[in-house]
């Protein structure tokens, strides 16, 4: 079969199309003919050597949708989607014509989505759900501040928080970056170019602050997020770019009885990821959790697309369509 593959990390030049043997499913696994596979920023970092979980040689790719062609008889022929586990990092991933995963990792394709749309649902929604529901345990009636609201993970988080009954405060780097009304379920927007984040949050919450802050950026905005927390508020961090080290006033932190959580979607098992997608599926099929805008490309375009993502040249979610033949 054809696959994207890299034999060493450090440069995107190491990523190439290769002819490799099709994988053989072990007991408890299924062989999926990949109809669509998303490319995520973490896939790019994987090849660049920025993810310590990576072992080589490796086929990247975390998210996928396709048809089960080998496995338990009751599953063969089913259209499925999935993500998670160590897919693409510790075991070969979805940027290939075929991929093997545990049978517990796949779920039926959402009734309202294509293969390409389903493949785009994984990492962003999984990360947002793991942060807001699993870690912060957000409740109806609470206020959620979402940093980077218009991005893939931020927009998924805004929709999840709204569905769970929270009031949503969104942020944008400047006023022109605020989406048109109705595109996202955001109650209040803060323009970070003209408004100090903690002051802006206090203003729209009558001085109380946010019960939950979901910080997808880290670095310089980390401490401002902490200052925007309500008493006993929870802050969830999933990144820190470009500076991994941050500082904050520890006295203010403990007097506010704040709580800080780190979430890494790569630590989720296949079973945990599948459970998140299972909980999301009713909302997906109801249109509450829509897929991002996608554009499809043949597998051969993979190396170029990885470079485009690294250089922030992509405007929509790139989806690889391997067009697999026989096993």
Image (spheres, rainbow, N blue to C red):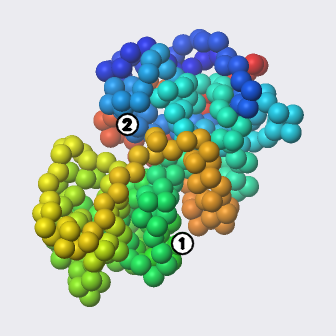
The residue carrying pointer 2 sits among few (fewer than 14), some (14 to 19) or many (20 or more) residues within 10 Å by Cα, namely: some
The C terminus is located in which quarter? top right
Helix, strand or loop at mark 1: helix
Query: Which residue matches tag 2?
Result: 309
| Mark 2 and mark 1 residues within 8 Å of each other at the beta carbon | no
Q: Is residue 93 above or below residue 14?
A: below
User: Looking at this view, is 310 or 45 the one in front?
Assistant: 45
Helix, strand or loop at mark 2: helix
Q: CA distance from mark 2 to mark 1?
A: 30 Å
- Judge from the rendering whether residue 34 lies leftward or rightward of residue 42; answer left or right: right
Residue 312 in percent (x, y) is at: 32, 40
The N terminus is located in which quarter? top right
Query: Which residue matches tag 1?
Result: 163
Residue 198 visible to the viewer: no
Residue 131 in percent (x, y) is at: 43, 58
Residue 232 visible to the viewer: yes
Residue at figure coordinates x 40%, y 39% from the top left: 41
- Judge from the rendering whether residue 171 lies leftward or rightward of residue 31; answer left or right: left
Residue at figure coordinates x 62%, y 45% from the top left: 271
């Amino acid at each position: 079969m054809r696959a994207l593959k890299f034999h060493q990390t450090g440069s995107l030049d190491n990523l190439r199309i290769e002819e490799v043997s099709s994988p053989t499913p072990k007991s408890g696994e299924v062989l999926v003919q990949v109809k669509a596979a998303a490319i995520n920023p973490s896939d790019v970092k994987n090849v660049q050597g920025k993810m310590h979980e990576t072992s080589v040689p490796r086929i990247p790719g975390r998210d996928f949708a396709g048809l089960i062609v080998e496995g338990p008889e009751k599953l063969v022929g089913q259209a499925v989607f999935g993500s998670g586990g160590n897919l693409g990092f510790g075991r070969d991933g979805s940027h290939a014509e075929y991929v093997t995963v545990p049978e517990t990792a796949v779920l039926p394709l959402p009734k309202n989505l294509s293969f390409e749309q389903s493949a785009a649902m994984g990492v962003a929604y999984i990360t947002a759900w793991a942060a807001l529901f699993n870690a912060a345990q957000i409740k109806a009636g609470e206020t959620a501040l979402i940093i980077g609201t218009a991005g893939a993970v931020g927009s998924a988080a805004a929709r999840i928080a709204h569905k769970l009954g929270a009031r949503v405060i969104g942020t944008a780097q400047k006023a022109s970056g605020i989406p048109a009304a109705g595109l996202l379920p955001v109650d209040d927007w803060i323009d970070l170019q003209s408004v100090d984040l903690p002051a802006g949050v206090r203003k729209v919450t009558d001085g109380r602050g946010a019960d939950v802050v979901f910080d997808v950026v880290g670095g310089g905005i980390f401490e401002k997020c902490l200052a925007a927390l309500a008493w006993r508020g929870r802050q969830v961090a999933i990144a820190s770019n470009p500076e991994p080290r941050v500082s904050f006033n520890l006295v203010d932190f403990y007097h506010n009885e704040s709580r800080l959580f780190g979430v890494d979607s790569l630590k989720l098992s296949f079973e945990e990821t599948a459970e998140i997608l299972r909980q999301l599926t009713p909302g997906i099929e109801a249109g509450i959790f829509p897929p991002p805008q996608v554009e499809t490309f043949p597998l051969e375009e993979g190396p170029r697309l990885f470079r485009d993502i690294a250089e922030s040249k992509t405007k929509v979610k790139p989806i690889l369509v391997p067009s697999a033949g026989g096993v």
